[in-house]
Image (cartoon, rainbow, N blue to C red):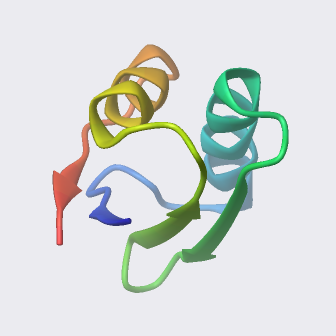
Amino acid sequence: MKFLIENMTCGSCVRHITSGVQALDPAATVEADVPARTITVHTVADRQQVEKAIADEGYVTSPI
């Protein structure tokens, strides 16, 4: 699943987002494109769970 994250501006943001997603699913992977402010998440969790995990880290997601 792919998301636009407007307030993702640096590598630290990516680490926080990855940490939140992996707290939900330790086997999840997050591929980030910081300049484009997008991430691709590979996980067994559903979209709502991933959105909540990212929101809990302080980031707003928009599905792509």
Is 11 rendered above or below residue 50? below
- Residue 44: x percent and y percent? 58, 46
Q: 37 or 3: which is nearer to us?
A: 3
Where is residue 21, by image quadrant? top right
Residue at the location (45% across, 15% down)? Answer: 56
Horizontal arrangement in the rendering, residue 27 relative to residue 40 (left or right): right
- Considering every residue shown, the one lying at the far top of the view is 56
Q: Is residue 42 above or below residue 44?
A: below
Q: Quadrant of residue 23?
A: top right
Q: Which residue is drawn at 45% across and 55% down?
A: 8
Q: Quadrant of the C terminus?
A: bottom left
Residue 29 falls left or right of residue 58? right
Q: Where is residue 32 in the image (x, y as percent from the top left)?
A: 59, 73
Residue closest to the eye, 24 or 58: 24
Q: Position of residue 41 (x, y in %)?
A: 54, 61
Q: Is residue 15 left or right of residue 31?
A: right
Q: In which quarter of the image is the N terminus?
A: bottom left
